[in-house]
Amino acid sequence: MTGNDRSSPETSDAYISVPILTGQPASYLARTLKQYKSRERVNDHEMSMMSERASYLSDQDIEDI
């Protein structure tokens, strides 16, 4: 395996996909954050990470974002 291979053990943790938030409508952001918070939207390690972060947000925090 090469260092550029995403499945390579030495590089697999270096690639973390995150949702694209820039330019998204406020309603989409609020809905998505609420889904992460309630764990309705968890399908892999990265999304699990988002759920953990969103769990600290109150509903008002989400609306304020």
Image (cartoon, grey):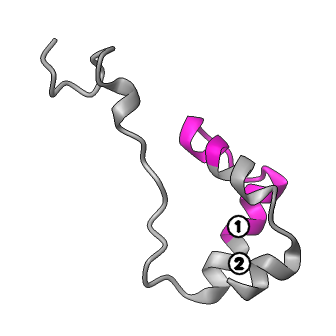
Q: Which residue is mark 1?
A: 33
How many numbered discs sit on the rendered protein? Answer: 2
Q: Residue 33, how many percent across, how many down? A: 70, 67
Give the percent coordinates (x, y) of residue 27.
66, 86
Determine which quarter of the picture holds residue 3. top left
Q: Is residue 25 left or right of residue 38?
A: left
- Identify the amino acid type marked 1: Leu
Majority SS type along the magenta span: helix
**Magenta-drawn stretch contains 35:** yes
Q: Please report the bounds of the magenta region as a residue range.
A: 32-49
Query: What residue is shown at x 79% (from left), y 78% (from top)?
Result: 61
Looking at the image, residue 61 sits to the left or right of residue 22; the answer is right
Q: Are marks 2 and 1 in contact (CB under 8 Å)?
A: yes
Image quadrant in which the C terminus is located:
bottom right
**Horizontal side of residue 13 vs 24, given as left or right:** left
- Badge 2 is on which residue? 30
Element marked by disc 1:
helix
